[in-house]
Image (cartoon, rainbow, N blue to C red):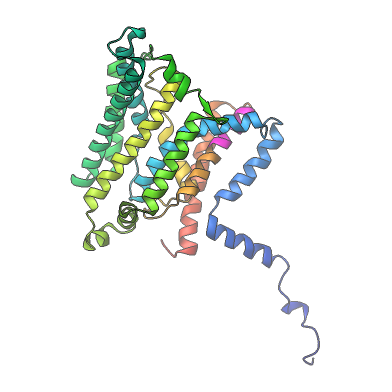
Amino acid sequence: MNSTESPSTQDRPAPWRAPLALLDRLFERLGVLPFLMVAALVIFSNLSEHFLSEQNLMNLLRQSVFLVLVSLGQMLALVSGGFDLSVGTGLAITSVVGAQVMSQLFAGGDGVVGVSMAILGGCGAGLAAVAVLGCVNGIGVAWLGVSPFIMTLATQSIGFGVALYLTGGVPVSGLPGSFSNLFGFGQWLGLPIPVWITAAMLVVFYVLLNRTRFGQNLYAVGGNARAAALSGIDTRRVLFLTYLACALVVGVAGLLLTARLESGETNIGGTMALESIAACVIGGVSLRGGMGRLPNVLFGCLFIGLVQNGLNLAQVGSYLQMIVLGALLIVAVVSDQFWLRRYYRIG
């Protein structure tokens, strides 16, 4: 065959190679999350005609803000090379302490201070209480060398016991109505106030992770703590601040949940540790530390909320929803390992 003749059929590239190469590049850049979101949108929009309605999407956005806030803190812990199992307890401690102080200062309108001061005092007390939890975690992990798993598991149990002791398992009521009206049900420019607060926290964390020395040091410590220490980074300080920041952002979520429920609750964060870890890992945060992007975590949270919302509309029971969430976490971890081995030759 001369050079002017067309190549044989065997020499031509198969027609399916180009689409597969495109999918491979998308997976390398974005991970498994976009594929999961498309699949969920297709499935749930077919199961329920109300899934893509404006009202349902607004409800999805409103319900997702609490997971987004907790996942911001969980992301810090994961990037540092650990994780925080006490985020659910942080929600409960903030809610209970904040509600008790607020209700005592308010006292049905007959308290020693005005409504605004009662709200500020309750919010400050709730954040201070969860900050203590974060400091204990930080000291245990950074200075005492306790495994993050053991340390946060222990503080989860201790904190939950403290919350039950303070309340006897009974919800704390008597909060100022303006607290719930503003932070639980208020709106501005057509969007709920919690959405605006969450958006502000996203901006703060983006700057913290990408524009500050702390963010650079956090990724360095998570990637290789020994190398980071040899390069002059105070790894103990970074880890301590990581768990403190995680606790504080969880405290913000706890106050917003308290306003939404109009009472202080001890059982508001039972599954939040699992959900926040799942959202982060699905969003591409590596369980090995040192790797994770904030926008991907946001989409991971929205995906978890989307799945829960779709299952509710499809009238799937809460027990089966727990099975689905656990299965999604397994899928996320497997894809995380595959992604690292394929594109970064790790493992």
Q: Is residue 243 visible?
A: yes
What is the span of residues highlighted in magenta in the rendered image? 305-314
Residue 134 at x, y percent in the picture: 28, 36
312 within the magenta span: yes
User: Residue at 49% of width from left, 45% of height from top?
Assistant: 330
Up the image or down, 302 lies above or below 107; here it is below
| Image location (x, y in percent) of residue 127 | 31, 29
For residue 46, side relative to residue 235 (left or right): right
The secondary structure that dominates the magenta segment is helix
Q: Residue at x 35, y 43 (%)?
A: 83
Percent coordinates x, y for residue 79 in the rendering: 37, 50
Query: Residue at 69% of width from left, 33% of height from top?
Result: 47
Which quadrant: the N terminus? Answer: bottom right
**Would residue 194 be found to the left or right of residue 313 on screen?**
left
Q: Which residue is situated farthest in the bottom direction here?
A: 2
Residue ranking furthest to the left = 144
Q: Position of residue 75 (x, y in %)?
A: 40, 45
Can residue 275 be seen in the rendering of this structure?
no
Q: 199 or 133, which is in the foreground?
A: 199
Q: Is residue 247 above or below residue 114?
A: below
- Between residues 324 and 239, which one lies in front from this camera angle? 239
Please give the name of the residue rendered at 40% of the width and 36% of the height, measured from the top-left corner.
Answer: 273
Residue 105 occupies which quadrant of the picture?
Answer: top left
How many numbered badges does the structure rendering display?
0
In the picture, the quarter occupied by the C terminus is bottom left
- 150, 278: nearer the viewer: 278
250 over 242 or under it: above or below: above
Does the stretch in magenta take in 294? Answer: no
Q: Is residue 241 left or right of residue 272?
A: left
